[in-house]
Image (spheres, helix red, strand yellow):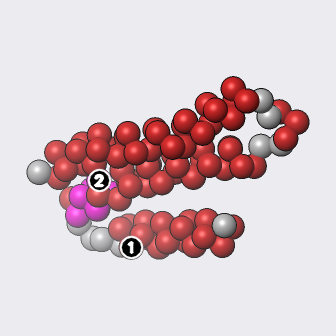
Amino acid sequence: AFRCFVFIVLSYVQVFRAVLKIPAEQGQHKAFTTCLPHFAVVFLLVSTVMIAYLKPPSISSSSLDLLVALLYSLVPPALNPLIYSMRNHEIK
C-alpha cells in the first residue's frame, strides 16, 4: 500500500511539473482545471482511508469507525459528479 501511495504522489509531482512547463498562462490554467478536481477527489479518498487505517487502536470507538467508514465510502463518490461537472463547466 505504501508503494502505491508513493507512486501516486510521484505521478502527481510529474504532472504538476509538466503543467508548470507549459509556456502559455491560459494553457496552464486549462491544465490545472483538468487536474485539480481529480487530485481533490484522490486526496479526499486517501486521507480518509489513512485516518481509518492508521489511527491508534486506543482511540477506536464504534461511532468513530462508522463515521470514518462513511466518509471514505460515500463522500468521494458523491462528490465526483459535482467536482467533474464544475470542471467541465469551467473548461467550456
Q: Is residue 92 visible from the viewing direction of this image?
A: yes
- Graded by Cα atoms within 10 Å as few (under 14), some (14 to 19) or many (20 or more), the crowding at tag 1 reads few
Residue 25 appears in the picture as rendered: no
Left or right: residue 85 compared with residue 62: left
Q: Give the extent of the magenta segment.
A: 27-33
**The residue positioned farthest toward the top in the image shown:** 63
Residue 18: numbered disc: 1
Q: Position of residue 68 (x, y in %)?
A: 62, 36
Residue at image x 77%, y 43%?
A: 55
Pinpoint residue 41: horizontal percent, then vertical percent: 44, 49
| Residue 88 position in % (x across, y down) | 19, 50
Q: Which residue is mark 2?
A: 33
Q: Nearer the viewer, residue 76 or 23?
A: 76
Identify which amino acid the numbered label 2 is placed on: Thr
Q: Amino acid at mark 1?
A: Ala
Q: Main secondary structure of the magenta part?
A: helix
